[in-house]
Image (spheres, rainbow, N blue to C red):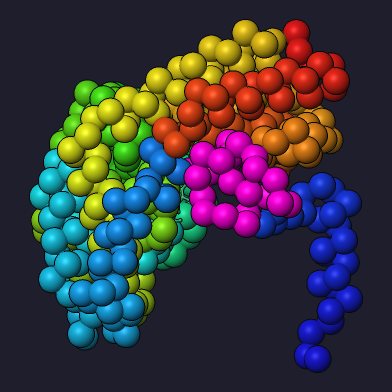
Amino acid sequence: MPISLDLINAELARLEQSQTFKYEVPLQSAQDGVVRVNGKKVVMLASNNYVGLSNHPAVRRAAIEGIRKYGYGVASVRFICGTQDIHLKLEKKISKFLGTEDTILFSSCWAANEAFFASLTNEKLGLESYKDVLYSDRLNHASIIDGQRLCKAETTDRKIYKHADMDDLVRQLEEDKAAPYRFRIIATDGVFSMEGDLAPLDRLVEIARTYGALLFVDDSHAVGVCGKTGRGTPEAKGVHGKIDVLTGTLGKAIGGAAGGYISGKKELIAFMRQKARTYIFSNSLPPSIVYGASAAFDLLMKDRSIVKRLHDNTAYFRKKIAALGFTILEGDHPIVPIMLGEAALAQQMSNELLKEGVYIKGLWFPVVPRGEARLRAQISAALTRKDIDRALLAFERVGRRLNVLH
Ligand SMILES: Cc1ncc(COP(=O)(O)O)c(C=O)c1O
């Protein structure tokens, strides 16, 4: 063995000791409002299945239809022989839903975010010399951070602004105003997954315009979720159709299988088709996913009650859990952080809740700051009032037992 497995084992032991080891609890059923774990039915409060489409009959039917008509796999990247007409149709549908000019599909949003920054900034575009600059929210998702790491240091300055702090962003843009940057790119999540808060996109659109910057928004936790019709953070913040570049996943609200996209100006999308390495050198999305995601968008466009049910469930859970005496981060997103403080308590509480029939995950350092350990509840339209009430009852019992209610 050319590497020392002792070192690997020691690291695994360290992860366990520091309570940062990630255990996987297998579900014995489809992803849904109620799932089966250890042979028992439990209420699911940890999935990104926000509008309950992961196991929706119309989405399941569509996925099977996709296989029937177009086969199981495409066995190619897009530009060789992996583009089926259904890929182009789904790209059009996403553009229509988001109010953008064009869309390019990826195997995941991770792949989309990884491709975007380097594709743009590592190209000379005929210039002898140039420099680009990126401004990134401190709490941006790992895929944005890793995507930006692929930009060459000689030609890209990478800057971080304090979380959602527009004064800090403007201060940095002002400082750089006279610098001869080629591209200035502001990058933010639409919804931040640890806090459930929305980026101030209305301000960001204004700021990007003022400073000639391109605004990049990863709306993975918002499409199908935020805004009256589920168009995402731009709809919720009154700037639908005004974001330069949107990325997102098909692996959360949009059926929850896999897949991602970049959506925006047609020139940028055409450029990505030529330059994005995770698109050019990686397989096309399989027909089952293309059909399933397409059906998910159709459902969202046809039936407004789906998103409304999610919003109603969220408001109900937020009100009731706070009334029980738990401390939550205020907001209106279905991500509801229940603040506990210490990692051990969050871990104990999530274990106890599972025994009481509620599946919920704890988050602690280094995922969130030290002393801010929490449970992250994620509400879904797949939950009935009865499911939510059952979960609340379990919260009350466990909360009392562990003495965390105020
Ligand atoms: C904000 C954000 N962006 C991107 C991703 C990655 O999406 P995918 O699973 O499609 O790679 C996630 C998933 O956790 C996410 O939360």
Residue at x-position 84% and y-position 81%: 4
Q: Is residue 381 visible?
A: yes
Q: Which residues are magenta?
A: 27-48
Q: Position of residue 397 (x, y in %)?
A: 77, 20
Residue 345: quarter of image: top right
Quarter of the picture holding the C terminus: top right
Residue at x-position 23% and y-position 80%: 82
Which residue, as the protein is rendered here, is positioned at the far bottom? Answer: 1
Residue 110: quarter of image: bottom left
Residue at x-position 58% and y-position 13%: 320
Residue at x-position 70% and y-position 46%: 40
Q: Position of residue 333 (x, y in %)?
A: 44, 26
Q: Position of residue 41 (x, y in %)?
A: 65, 43
Q: Position of residue 385 (x, y in %)?
A: 50, 23
- Decide if residue 309 is on the left or right side of residue 405: left
Task: Decide whether residue 293 is among the magenta residues.
Answer: no
